[in-house]
């Protein structure tokens, strides 16, 4: 179903405006949308829930994305998997193909020790996130440096919790 068809025929003007802004700017926060539309954040949250039920947007935490953008990101992630590698053995420890899988792997400790430290310290994980268009998540890892890998991973897990449904 095309957004334009639904937006022009069935949606109130405020919801159409939200969709227009998301199509133009991509992912936005509730606060950004509220300021742009001229309504309260609670109104944006209410409309975003309605739009999500129609399959037009995807909500994660305080961020809202057009559904098409989310589907494209999922396709891209699936075509660009990330492999956690144990540098000592050269063996693949785990393969992830989405932010949700990465969040689960980190949250539940599926990747530990050298493989995780290597993915962060080498910049490989940050690079993968950038290829997915996740500059903000990559920046969290960039700020870590080699000495603060654990702290960076904690911040990444928190950010992924806000972005995914885990």
Image (spheres, rainbow, N blue to C red):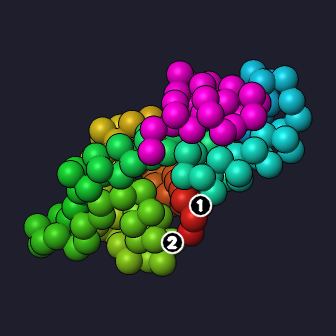
Query: What element does badge 1 sit on?
Result: helix
Q: Which residue is mark 1?
A: 161
Residue 26 in sight: no
Magenta range: 1-28
Looking at the image, is 2 positioned above or below residue 79? Answer: above
| Mark with earlier residue (2, 1) | 2
57 w.r.t. 119: above or below: above
Where residue 88 appears, as percent x and y from the top left, is: 16, 69
Q: Is residue 26 magenta?
A: yes
Percent across and percent down for residue 97 are: 29, 60
Q: What residue is drawn where x is 75% and y is 34%?
A: 12
CB under 8 Å between discs 2 and 1: yes
Residue 78: which quarter of the image?
Answer: bottom left
> Which residue is at a point 80% across and 49% down the rendered structure image?
46
Dot label at residue 107: 2
**Local crowd at mark 1 within 10 Å, few (<14), some, or many (≥20)?**
some
Q: Nearer the viewer, residue 156 or 112?
A: 156
| Left or right relative to 48: residue 136 | left
| Alpha carbon distance from label 2 to label 1 | 9 Å
Of labels 2 and 1, the one closer to you = 1
Observer-nearest of 78 and 72: 72
């Amino acid at each position: 179903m095309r957004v334009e068809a639904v937006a022009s025929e069935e949606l109130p003007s405020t919801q159409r405006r939200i969709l227009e802004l998301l199509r133009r700017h991509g992912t936005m926060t509730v606060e950004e949308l509220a300021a742009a539309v001229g309504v309260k954040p609670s109104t944006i949250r209410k409309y975003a829930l309605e739009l999500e039920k129609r399959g037009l947007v995807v909500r994660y935490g305080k961020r809202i994305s057009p559904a098409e953008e989310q589907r494209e990101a999922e396709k891209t992630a699936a075509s660009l998997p990330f492999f956690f590698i144990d540098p000592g053995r050269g063996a693949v420890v785990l393969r992830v193909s989405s932010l949700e899988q990465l969040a689960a792997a980190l949250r539940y400790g599926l990747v530990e020790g050298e493989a995780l430290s290597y993915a962060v310290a080498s910049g490989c994980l940050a690079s993968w996130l950038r290829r997915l268009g996740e500059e903000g998540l990559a920046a969290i890892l960039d700020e870590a440096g080699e000495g603060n890998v654990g702290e960076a991973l904690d911040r990444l897990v928190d950010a992924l919790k806000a972005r995914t449904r885990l």
